[in-house]
Image (cartoon, grey):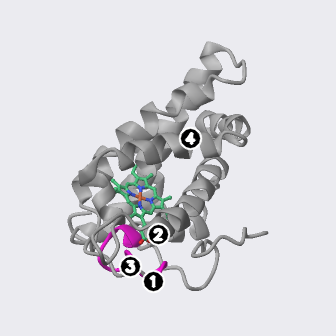
Amino acid sequence: TTRPSIPGYTLGTPEVATSPITDAEFALLKQTVLLGDDDVRYLRMAGEVLSDQIEAILDVWYGFVGSNAHLVHYFSGADGKPDARYLGAVRQRFAQWIRDTCAANYDRAWLDYQHEIGLRHTSAKKNRTDGLVSPAPHIHLRYLIAFIVPITATIKPFLSKKGHSAADVDGMYTAWFKAVTLQITLWSEPYVAPSAF
Ligand code: HEM
């Protein structure tokens, strides 16, 4: 597989953490978010629809984070102000994440990278990838979970921009919601005691 050369993007490399979830546990998690073959087909469709709109989507998400002091705080550098270099570096990986979410095959490399992204939101790995000194050591779990709503709600207008039927737009939107919820669930693992996850 060809890996895009994005600083700090390490999917499929040995540097990535290992996901503790078993295949059986992951199968039950997919079953619980009702993610099936139709959803995977709709994710691929979404990948095509979104591919040339990624910068516009990121403008919306970054606009939301930037206009909320309690969120942009997590992007602050040593001086307590938003760190432009950090914001820019994460943005590139975020763009790749949109593509990866639509192309996901849910294999071990993918699962391991979900664990890695989860760790990068916790004090175990936040700020390390970009070599940052930040007053924000981790993203609070409550915002990680709550962020599912803006990440989902704001995607719909982009899914409907390429002339697809209402049924297809709805299918892509539902699949996106399931895929994001599945990932945030996996990312929450390093926040909680193993017995609680
Ligand atoms: C990193 C997505 C919630 C702040 C990332 C990355 C992605 C992402 C894809 C880059 C992963 C990589 O390194 O390859 C998401 C999604 C969220 C979410 C889908 C919830 C649905 C949040 C929230 C905040 C936040 C609520 C707080 C404002 C950050 C920061 C980084 C990051 C600061 C950089 C972490 C580091 O130092 O490596 N996020 N995120 N994220 N996210 Fe989130």
Query: The residue under label 4 is which amino acid type?
Result: Ile
Query: Mark 2 or mark 4, which has the lower sequence index?
Result: 4
Q: Quadrant of the C terminus?
A: bottom left
The residue segment tinted magenta is 119-130
Can you identify the residue that label 1 sits on? 131
Query: Mark 3 or mark 1, which has the lower sequence index?
Result: 3
Q: CA distance from mark 4 to mark 1?
A: 26 Å
Quick check: is the Cβ at mark 2 less than 8 Å away from ligand 1? yes
Q: Are marks 3 and 4 in contact (CB under 8 Å)?
A: no
Can you identify the residue that label 2 sits on? 86
Q: Are marks 4 and 1 in contact (CB under 8 Å)?
A: no
Q: CA distance from mark 3 to mark 4?
A: 26 Å
Can you identify the residue that label 4 sits on? 57
Mark 1: few, some, or many residues within 10 Å (few <14, many ≥20)?
Answer: few
Query: Mark 1 or mark 2, which has the lower sequence index?
Result: 2
Can you identify the residue that label 3 sits on? 125
Query: The residue under label 2 is which amino acid type?
Result: Tyr
- The residue under the point 66% across, 24% down is 161
Image x and y of residue 190, in percent: 31, 71
Q: Judge from the rendering whether residue 65 lies leftward or rightward of residue 176; answer left or right.
A: left
Q: CA distance from mark 3 to mark 1?
A: 10 Å
